[in-house]
Image: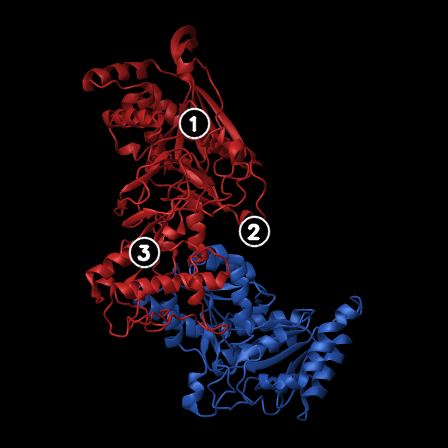
Amino acid sequence: MSERELTYGEAVKEAIAEEMRRDPRVFLIGEDVAEAGHPFKTLVGLVQEFGTDRVIDTPISEPGYAGIGVGAAMTGMRPVVDVMFGDFITLTMDQMVNQAAKAHYMSGGKIKVPIVFRTTLGATRRSAAQHSQSLHAWVSHVPGLKVALPSGPYEAKGLMKTAIRDDSPVVIFEDKMMYRVKGPVPEGDYTIPFGVAEVKRAGRDVTIVATSSMVPVSLGAAKLLEDVGISAEVIDPRTTWPLDKQALIDSARKTSRALVVDEGYERYGVTAEIASVIGEGAFYYLDAPVKRMGAMDVPVPFSPVLEDLTVPSEQTVFEAARALCRR
Amino acid sequence: MPANVIMPALELAQETGKLLRWIKAPGDMVRKGEPIAEIETDKVTVELEAPASGILQDVTAQEGDVVPVGHTIAIIADSASPTLSPQGGRSGTLAPQGSGAVPTLSPQGSGAVPTLSPQGRGQGEGPTSDRIKASPLARKVAEAHNVDLAHVRTASGKIEKADVLAYVESRRTVATAGNGGPGTIVAASPKARRFAAERGIDLRALKGSGPEGAVLAMDVPAAAEPTGTGPLTSAPLTSALLTLPSPQRGEGVAAGEGGGIPRRGVEDAASQEKVGTVWRVMAERMAASWTSAPHFFLVREVAVARLGAWLDKARAQTGVRITYTDLLIKLVAAAIVQHPRVAVSWRDGVIERHPDVNVGLAVALEDGLVVPVIHRADTLGLKEIAARREDLVARAQAGKLRPADIQGGVFTISNLGMYGVDAFSAIVNPPQAAILAVGRITDRVIPVDGKPAVQPTMVLTLSCDHRALDGARGARFLGALADLIEEPLTLLV
């Protein structure tokens, strides 16, 4: 196996580039995706290789270019639509929810919408309340959409390639704070199946279900827990839909305790859904209530001191898991 | 504070218990732990111990009554406190004010404010009861009510008897208010509830170490031990059984049905009583085993000439009346040590292993069948096995078995040789995975060096639950056992 390391951002770019080389129907559209190479510098070089016909800059017009993407997908293309900040999916809701998610069903299967909406989540970038939200729960709620949450460079490439090849609309949320994080990424072609959770770390005493940005945080917390004699299992669903319910239930059944950590707002969030999946599936095996940890239920503050308090950290995850274990 | 005397559940399949005799009379002063009544539970007759010290009163069950498990049959009142019926009206005055609020209790002159202990950060290392300031009397009262003093908060920091009693009352109030019903709901985790139900343990008898005194899995006896060492007299409780409405009694559902959960609907108890509890339990467990466990049977005839010689020698050496059954227990234990894979249970889709070689022996009684257990038979000598077997059989026939005597078996031997039976097929004793049916020893014609010879033999039939065992595994075990029987000296070498 290759020991090559890429950053999360490079892994995303490599996935898109490989898919564009493989399939001429794949194209990229969005704000600052071409000449600027994206504000997060994740797409640098693509326009030079594929040209402005396939890497298309748009005006600031999310509803417009999202609609272009949906229409192109309906007529046979496989667009990757870039929504710079996850907060801006509010502007693309009709295109995603009422058009892309519905067309296949309302046409009796005659129309496919193989579109990928590529966007971001994650706070602590000092980007204030309108550029720091993690809104993946919104689209996870809608039947007809698939939602992927890569938790590292390896997942960023594998899940992006699966998303582009999927015939259903997929929304993929990248953690904007992880773009410079390096990790092993195999060269060449590989995909990560949707709906298959991965146990990132096996353990006996408590299950920590973590998504996206919260996976490294939870792995750090698991190390702290190990120091106090608690063996934590960290499991990453990788996609919130399809959701690998059985893997989560099995893990919770094994450990009897579950903590669900996700960077979206805690109330009515991904943590609530996963906690109830575990509650229903592992009830008679649980020795404590399922605990949820999400972002604080406030608009993300601009003050760095305050902002850092709104999201789970290694320390708070550690403390919550330890309390669950009553040690 | 009064303590309720409840009909105990000692067996999973038990739904009711029969009050045989009151040892203490109403008005008697009783000490905690002192026997106050004799109860005929499933399979055994046990002495019911006083759950607290005080005066026995409000006796509601008469001798001969059949009472659903979990029901209060009497009250032990604190000699210093007024009588309070189990469904006393006092909770009404202590009901939480307003809706949705965490119920608290107004201080009753003691200056104590019992609160629900907060959960979460900083509580990881709560004070142990050793470090808690409490009066000796308060400790005694707390023990009597299964109260963890760590959960009792007072303004002064020191805990008096009244503080403990107020805490007990607040728990009762919380439970009653939460349910709206007259009974007390015990705070317990789902896992602890399942463990308790599987083991036939009443949650109210347990001291909880969780938030607000909730019973956790580790508080349920045997649950805290590693998987597989728990008592095996209970059958698995499937989630289907927990969610389906209770079927009519006598329908022969899995033995997991009911558990320690108090059951209503005992109107037909009179007709069941005619059969006797031991018989009824046998009927339910065998029906559950036969209908849920796919059985297969392995038959093997073994030569027992050498076993006979060994028996004579053992009797001469020890001076004890050792029986073939004792030898079989010893050899079966040795064979299980060689093939531990037969000591398993099929439970919720997984195979549970049981490390302790506890061999059960089916004993016929006038009114049914019991299976007392020789624990760790692999570690016992023949003399010890014989003594233990004799004691268990005598007490089984006298109806004096204790719960510990019938718990923990991982394999059963059923010997009908003394009735002249050549061979038979036994039904697996759940949740065990295998049972050995032993026929009589008699002279039979067998080939020896190509010629017919007349020698004593015995036919063994191993019944297996095919969910937990397969033919090859069963056969290997039976083969090892046959080898040991035919060459018992290999055990000594």
Using the rendered image of the protein, determine whether residue A2 is visible from the camera's viewpoint. Answer: yes
Q: Give the drawing colour for chain B.
A: red
Residue picked out by circle 1: B369
Who is closer to the viewer here, B468 or A291?
A291
Residue picked out by circle 2: B243
Q: Quadrant of residue A315?
A: bottom left
Upstream in sequence: badge 3 or badge 1: 3
Q: From the viewer's perspective, is residue A309 above or below residue A277?
A: below
Q: Position of residue B295 (x, y in %)?
A: 53, 31
Residue picked out by circle 3: B145
Who is closer to the viewer here, B420 or A8?
B420
SS for callout 3 = loop
Upstream in sequence: badge 1 or badge 2: 2
SS for callout 2 = helix
Q: Amino acid at mark 2?
A: Thr
Number of callouts:
3
Tell me, by letter, which chain the rendering colours blue.
Answer: A
> The residue marked by circle 3 belongs to what chain?
B
